[in-house]
Each structure stands twice: as structure tokens, then as C-alpha cells.
Amino acid sequence: APLLVRTGFVGQLWDAASLDLAPQPAAMSESSTLQLAAQLTGDDGTTQPTATAVTWETTSPFLTVDAAGLVTTGLLPGDQNAIVSAHGGDLTGSALISLSDLTPDDYGLFAGDGLEDDWQWLWFGTDPGSAAPGTDADSDGQTNAMEFLAGTNPLDPWSLLRIRMERITGEETARRLIFEPWLPIRTYTWRSSMDLQSPWLPVQGDPVAVQPDGEAHATDDFATEPRKFYRLQIE
């Protein structure tokens, strides 16, 4: 029990159509466990426990699953999606598990260096020795820390934070300050100094605005000094 009775039939043959895993969808945070269960679903939509042993496996490097379907995850380099599979007889079922990273700088050799682990894993997952903030992996003159802030590819010497200044036609006392790339997740502030020693003060003028071509423009409305130095602060 419970039984499904069909009037007019002496008996019922039940055919397993799929092996389904639960819970689904599933979610885990790092350093946690989750118990999965497998059941058979028939071609009529009814379910019953598996009659044979189920074999569990996962290809994710961030999960382990034991013979009873208990899934365990350790520290993560960032949010991930993982798949756990179960095999029973000639049927296979799978579960998609969303993995949530709780601490952004705690994974393996990437831990505690000030760069987010998911960025380091993306670019240096197979070569963690090249992921240090002060390393210039592509020898383009910009460190990993700078490329992380700028949103550039740390393995491509042509992918750089580029900065330049232009005169503005008809405005002799103003200068246009330009950089690329621009990222919506960053805050940009232009600062200036007269001699590289005095305080770096915020530039007075139009704020940073992204352009259709991906460049970001700002203006200094008071570029009247004989010489002036600029730097771009990214947070």
C-alpha cells in the first residue's frame, strides 16, 4: 500500500521510465552536506523506490558523494553549478546543484591575498602559482591586482587598462580624461596633483560617463596649470 487499482484488469505491469533524484532543484553553501534520494517513475507517472542498488557519482571538483547519496562540499572559489548523477539498472538520473560561495577570498592557494577567488579561478585555475596580486602573468606591465580592478584579461598582453587625455575644441582651460574598459561594478574617480607630491584631489568637472564605444569620458574644467598630473582611482 498504497495501491493503484484499475477496474477491469486482473493485474498491472509497472514499467520504470526514469530514475529521478530529489530534492530538485537543490542548493548548497560551501562546507555543507545535502542528502539526495533516488526513486523510479513509471510510464504512468506513479513512483516507487528503486529495486536495485544505485551508484552515485559527480564530475565536479568541488563535491563528493558517498554510496548513500550524501553530498559534501568544501570551500569554493566562487558560486558554481554542479551535477550529481545516479545509475540504477539501465536508467540514469541527475540533479543540478547550485553552490554558493560564502567568503570570496578563502579558497586554497588563492586565499587571503586580496583578490576574489572566483576571478583567480577563472584565469588561473590550472596555474595558481601565477595568480598572486603582484604577478604580471602576461608581461604587459599591469599586475594581476590592476587587471582585476580594470576588468582586463590577465593572460592577454593586449588586454590593458588604457588612459589618455585630449584637448576639447573651444575650451582651452578644459581637458577630456578618457579610459577603457569601463565596468558597471566599479567606481571611478579622477584625481590630480601639481607635482606628484601634493595631495591628490578630486578633479572638478564632468563626472565619468560611459560612451557607446565602451570608453568612459570625464572632464577637468580647471586645467589651467603649467603642468598637472592625473591618476584614475578604481574601487
Image: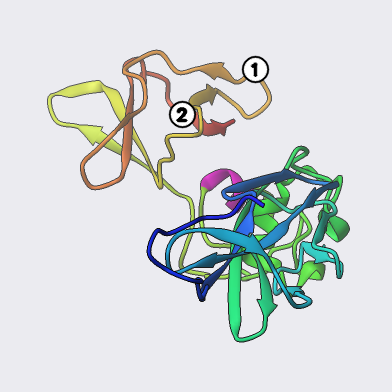
Disc number lying in front (2 or 1): 1
Kind of residue at badge 1 = Pro
Distance between mark 2 and mark 1 Cα atoms: 15 Å
Kind of residue at badge 2 = Arg
Asked if one can make out residue 10 in the rendered structure from this viewpoint, the answer is: yes
Residue 3 is situated, as x and y percent measured from the top left of the image, at 58, 54
Please state if 152 lies on the left or on the right of 122 as rendered: left
Residue 63 is situated, as x and y percent measured from the top left of the image, at 78, 62
What kind of secondary structure does the magenta stretch mostly adopt? Answer: helix
**Which residue position holds label 1?**
199
User: Disc 1 on helix, strand or loop?
Assistant: loop
Residue 222 is situated, as x and y percent measured from the top left of the image, at 35, 15
Tag on residue 227? 2
Q: Which residues are magenta?
A: 146-150
User: Which residue occupies 82% across, 65% down?
Assistant: 64
User: Disc 2 on helix, strand or loop?
Assistant: loop
Q: Residues within 10 Å of mark 2 (few under 14, many from 20)?
A: few
Please state if 42 lies on the left or on the right of 106 as rendered: left
User: Which residue occupies 50% across, 67% down?
Assistant: 42
In the foreground, 188 or 4 = 4
Residue 90, picture quadrant: bottom right
In the rendered image of this protein, does residue 72 appear above or below residue 104? below
Sequence-earlier tag: 2 or 1: 1
Residue 132 drawn in magenta: no
Asked if one can make out residue 142 in the rendered structure from this viewpoint, the answer is: no
In the foreground, 231 or 144 = 144
